[in-house]
Image (cartoon, rainbow, N blue to C red):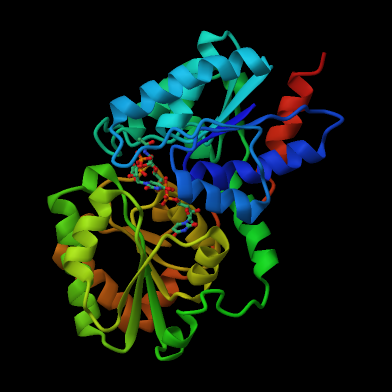
Amino acid sequence: MFVFGTRPEAIKLSPLILQARARNNEFETVAIATAQHRAMMDDVLSAFGIKPDADMNIMTPGQTLFMLTSRILSGMENIMEQYQPDVVVVQGDTATAYTASLAGYYARKKVAHVEAGLRTGNKWAPFPEEIYRKMISSIADYHFAPTETSRQNLLKENYPDSAIHVTGNTVIDALLWMEEQLRGAPCPLEDFAPVLERYKRLVLITGHRRENFGEPFLRICTALREMAMKNPDVCFAYPVHLNPNVQKPVHAILEGIGNFFLLPPLSYPDFVWMMRKSCLIISDSGGVQEEAPALSKPVLVTRRISERPEAIEAGVIKLVGDDTDKIIYESQRLLDDPAYYKSMARGISPYGDGRASERILDILSESLKV
Ligand code: UD1
Ligand code: UDP
């Protein structure tokens, strides 16, 4: 049983679900959508052609963490009873992933954690994801770690070596598959294509982390505004996350600048197309930090701390936090200094080779054999 609810979980579990369904002599596959994200999850499922077996439809506008976790957990009771899975597979560190793993434990089922072992060591950043992922680890029977660093994090917390498997991150499976579909495609955004033609370079932006809400978000948006005004020949595009805590400050600060385009969240194919077209990405997204290095795109990460040190250590992404001056300085340097730009745009992919799903399914198949 695969359980997912948000955009990134749907992206990262889609390759696994499709491959498990194809290996139907080994697996009976059930895909459960909590729909923690209604529209953003649906967009991903339609891009991958996946129809969930059950949809809990739990999203409410402006939902709190209390509402979210209690609604998912109570909904999972019937799902567990109805499907009686051998293993519940969850991905990452969202409310859906945590509560589905807890539901699996309550129902005394095995739990597999995809993207296990990421840690910042700070329970408030990312909030609440650092605690969710630690709680999932304490429940999980299988820890599918994307990298050796994440494996080491789990070993330090005394999880047994035999339960930890380094597989790569399934996001790279999704990305490579989508790139293959897009090969040579023109700009899929009809209205935006003529806009893009007017500019030589594109800076792509995303942002949604809870710990950045309030003042940090305002500082980040102020930096973006300054950058757009200093560089009228560069196109700045920001597909804005639907969370009202993001929509409000972004529209208040960034609307009305000629070369700054606030877009609705993009479908996964459209977003991958835009990443490939961009010269620089400014983002606090976990998934984008993993994908962009594989596409040779530098990322300035608007976070103070990251659980993804591999790309930082490789020098292909850089933490800039929420300091307005630092964001402006680092972005301008990447736009102005070709040698510096080249040193970051190196096409290193620390998070996988596109075969993570296959490895995970091989391990599950072998271990669940009756
Ligand atoms: C969630 C995850 C976060 C993940 C992020 C990916 C939790 C607690 N947080 O944060 O770990 O990085 O997703 O994007 O699990 N909304 C819509 N339509 C949508 C999606 C969201 O309207 O399709 C709006 C709703 O008002 C919703 C709000 O966004 O209440 C917040 O969604 P929620 O899933 O609670 O939090 P995110 O900030 O999206
Ligand atoms: N993404 C997308 N459309 C967008 C912005 C991002 O499809 O408009 C994809 C992106 O390629 C990545 C994932 O969504 O795979 C990241 O999701 P998000 O930033 O919401 O969550 P996080 O990864 O930070 O948990």
Image coordinates of residue 103 in percent, x first then y, are 50, 16
Name above or below for residue 9 compared with residue 156. below
Q: Quadrant of the C terminus?
A: top right
Q: Is residue 353 visible?
A: no
Q: Quadrant of the N terminus?
A: top right
Image coordinates of residue 342 in percent, x first then y, are 44, 76
> Extreme right residue here?
25
Left or right of 305 on screen, residue 72: right
Left or right of 120 on screen, residue 287: right
Picture residue at 50% right of the left edge, 76% below the top: 277
Q: Quadrant of residue 231?
A: bottom left
Picture residue at 43% right of the left edge, 36% below the top: 118
Name above or below for residue 122 compared with residue 138. below
Picture residue at 60% right of the left edge, 57% below the top: 175
Q: Nearer the viewer, residue 61 or 319?
A: 61
Left or right of 262 on screen, residue 252: left
Image coordinates of residue 148 in percent, x first then y, are 53, 38
| Count of residue discs | 0
Q: Nearer the viewer, residue 60 or 339?
A: 60
Q: Is residue 126 visible?
A: yes
> Extreme left residue here?
215
Image coordinates of residue 85 in percent, x first then y, are 67, 18
Q: Nearer the viewer, residue 252 or 238?
A: 252
Picture residue at 65% right of the left edge, 69% below the top: 182
Name above or below for residue 224 compared with residue 335. above
Name above or below for residue 132 compared with residue 353. above
Left or right of 155 on screen, residue 199: left
